[in-house]
Image (spheres, coloured by chain):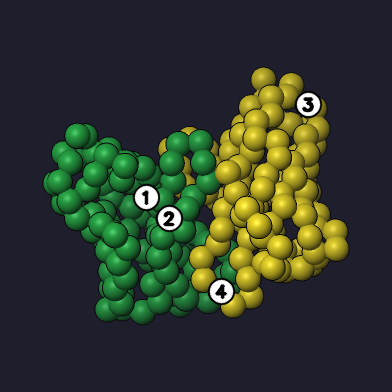
Amino acid sequence: DTGVSQNPRHKITKRGQNVTFRCDPISEHNRLYWYRQTLGQGPEFLTYFQNEAQLEKSRLLSDRFSAERPKGSFSTLEIQRTEQGDSAMYLCASSSTGGGGYTFGSGTRLTVV
Amino acid sequence: EDQVTQSPEALRLQEGESSSLNCSYTVSGLRGLFWYRQDPGKGPEFLFTLYSAGEEKEKERLKATLTKKESFLHITAPKPEDSATYLCAVQIRAAGNKLTFGGGTRVLVKP
C-alpha cells in the first residue's frame, strides 16, 4: 500500500465544464475526507465519509459539489458548472476508526480558465 | 466561532538557528491538536497529535507542546531540509472527525 492516491494530479478546465476527481484511500482506512486548499491558506473541510455513508458536509459546499464513495472504497468528487473561484488544490485524506492523524494524498490541482 | 491562528506567517532562519512556531486556538471541547508539514505541491504530512495540556512529543529536530490555549512547534538546530509550511489543526468533540486548520507558517532555512 503506497498511501492515499489522487487522480488526476492536475486539471485545467474551462468555466462551466464539469470535472471529477478520484481518491483511493489506504485500504484499511474506513474514513475518507475531502478538503480544499487555496494558495497560502490551510486546508478547508468539504465532506467526510465513514465507509460508504457521507456523514458530514460543509455548509460552504455549494450544490454544484457532490461526492460519493460507493462500496466504501474509492471516492469521487464532482464539481458541476465550474467557476473561477473553484480553482484550488483538492485534497483527499483517510484515517481509521481508532483515530490519530489523517494521511493525505498529494492532491488534485484544479485551474478553471 | 472556533478559530485557529498560526504565527508568524513566515519565518526565515539560518541553519542551526532554533526557533518556535505558535498555534493558538479558541475552541470548545478540544479532542486533539495536530501538526502537519507540507512541501510545495504536496499534501500535508502528519507529524504529531497532542491530546491534553502539558503533553509533549518529539521527532528528530521537532518538538511539539500543548497548553490549554496554544501549541508550540520548536525546531532545534534546523537544517535546509526543514524548509516547509507547518500547519496546525484542531479536532473538536462536537464537530465530528473533521480538522480545522490554521493558515500555516512558511519556514525557510538558509544554509
Cα separation between marks 1 and 2: 6 Å
The answer to whether tags 3 and 1 share a subunit is no
- Name the kind of residue labelled 3 in the image: Gly
For residue B58, say whether it is visible.
yes
The kind of secondary structure element at disc 4 is loop
| Image marks 1 and 2: residues in contact by CB distance under 8 Å | yes
Q: Which residue is mark 4?
A: A99
The answer to whether tags 4 and 2 share a subunit is no
Pointer 3 chain: A
Pointer 1 chain: B
Pointer 2 chain: B
The numbered dot on residue A16 is 3
Q: Which label sits in the foreground, 3 or 1?
A: 1
Of the chain colours in the picture, the one used for chain B is green
- Name the kind of residue labelled 4 in the image: Gly
The x, y position of residue A63, in whole percent, is 77, 46
The x, y position of residue B12, in whole percent, is 22, 38
Please, is residue B94 above or below residue B17 in the view? below
The kind of secondary structure element at disc 3 is loop
The x, y position of residue B107, in whole percent, is 29, 42
Pointer 4 chain: A
| Image marks 3 and 4: residues in contact by CB distance under 8 Å | no
Residue at x 40% of width, y 65% of height: B48
Q: Which residue is mark 1?
A: B86
